[in-house]
């Protein structure tokens, strides 16, 4: 089957505040995007990668990621959009146009740079086994409260039924196309698939697949390297 990974990497990284688009921020001297693409390719399950880059950085992103292409595959770079969903839609349209035979599509945030290849494998395996949509998840360790606009608690959901969601999220290519045809925005692609009434399955995620959002997260990522990961 043709497995294509879309990598939304066009964000500005405002919360990180590093002065570079987050995808190009180095950890241990290697840009987050390069680490994220390596993890995908090292799974051995991805044939092609399509990256949505910051529009002004398409050339540099192409240069740093071209050597990462899977054997017999390609790394394609397109300018991303204003919102993450726009970047995914642009990359998806490019993949379906340029890479005929695409049957499985992964969507993986460049910001989850330390995702172990085993998580990628588990997601692809589940889609290939027949699940139309698959997301890696972790249990919730903190108690979670629902609050109203004034910050007053209105409910305490049962933590045992809650999960934290990671990427890569994996989809039957036709299902993801239908989900994005709505043009709606969502913080994750599975959220759009849910609206179609399509079941979304889960596989175990991994703590290393944390999203690097803030300077604290970047410090954790540096610590992962010191600890021998990545
Ligand atoms: N992303 C994207 N296109 C956008 C916005 C975000 O491709 N217009 C990507 C980011 O590059 C990142 C992923 O979506 O890999 C998750 O977004 P987030 O962690 O919010 O990254 P940024 O938008 O870069 O960060 P911030 O919101 O702090 O500016
Ligand atoms: Mg953002």
Image (tube, rainbow, N blue to C red):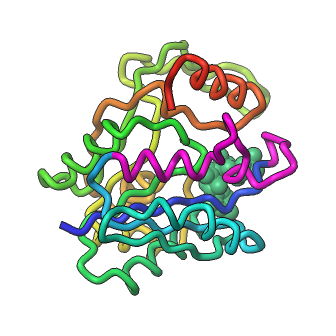
Which quadrant would residue 56 be assigned to in this image?
Answer: bottom right
| Residue at the far left in the pictured view | 129
* Vertical position of residue 80 compared to residue 22: above or below: below
User: Is 34 left or right of 101, judged from the image as shown?
Assistant: right
Instruction: Say which residue appears at 55% left-offset and 17% top-offset.
Output: 227
Which quadrant would residue 86 be assigned to in this image?
Answer: bottom right
Instruction: Say which residue appears at 29% left-offset and 53% top-offset.
Output: 133
Which quadrant would residue 39 be assigned to in this image?
Answer: top left
Instruction: Say which residue appears at 19% left-offset and 52% top-offset.
Output: 131
Q: Is residue 172 magenta?
A: no
Instruction: Say which residue appears at 34% left-offset and 70% top-offset.
Output: 73
Magenta-tinted stretch: 14-42
* Vertical position of residue 203 compared to residue 171: above or below: above
Q: Position of residue 37 (x, y in %)?
A: 48, 53
Q: Position of residue 158 (x, y in %)?
A: 42, 17
Q: Is residue 19 magenta?
A: yes
* Vertical position of residue 45 compared to residue 220: above or below: below
| Residue at the far bottom in the pictured view | 97
Split into 4 quadrants, where in the image is the N terminus?
A: bottom left
User: Is 70 left or right of 226, judged from the image as shown?
Assistant: left
Q: Position of residue 89 (x, y in %)?
A: 51, 72
Q: Count up the numbered dots.
A: 0
User: Is 199 left or right of 83, judged from the image as shown?
Assistant: left
> Residue 177 or 220: which is nearer the viewer?
220
> Residue 18 or 157: which is nearer the viewer?
18
């Amino acid at each position: 089957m043709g497995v294509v990974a879309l990598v939304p990497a066009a964000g500005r990284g405002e919360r990180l505040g590093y002065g570079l688009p987050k995808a190009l921020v180095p950890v241990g001297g290697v840009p987050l995007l390069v680490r994220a693409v390596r993890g995908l390719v090292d799974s051995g399950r991805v044939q092609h990668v399509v990256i949505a880059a910051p529009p002004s950085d398409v050339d540099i992103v192409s240069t740093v990621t071209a050597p990462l292409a899977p054997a017999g595959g390609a790394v394609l770079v397109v300018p991303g959009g204003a919102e993450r969903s726009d970047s995914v839609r642009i990359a998806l349209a490019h993949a379906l146009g340029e890479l005929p035979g695409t049957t499985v599509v992964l969507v993986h945030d460049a910001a989850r740079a330390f995702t172990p290849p085993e998580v990628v494998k588990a997601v692809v395996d589940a889609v290939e086994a027949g699940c139309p949509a698959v997301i890696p998840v972790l249990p919730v360790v903190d108690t979670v409260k629902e609050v109203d606009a004034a910050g007053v608690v209105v409910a305490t959901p049962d933590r045992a039924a809650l999960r934290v969601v990671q990427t890569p999220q994996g989809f039957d290519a036709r299902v993801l196309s239908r989900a994005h045809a709505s043009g709606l925005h969502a913080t994750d692609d599975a959220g759009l698939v849910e609206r179609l009434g399509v079941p979304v399955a889960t596989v175990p995620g991994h703590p290393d697949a944390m999203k690097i959002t803030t300077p604290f997260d970047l410090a954790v990522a540096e610590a992962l390297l010191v600890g021998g990961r990545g």
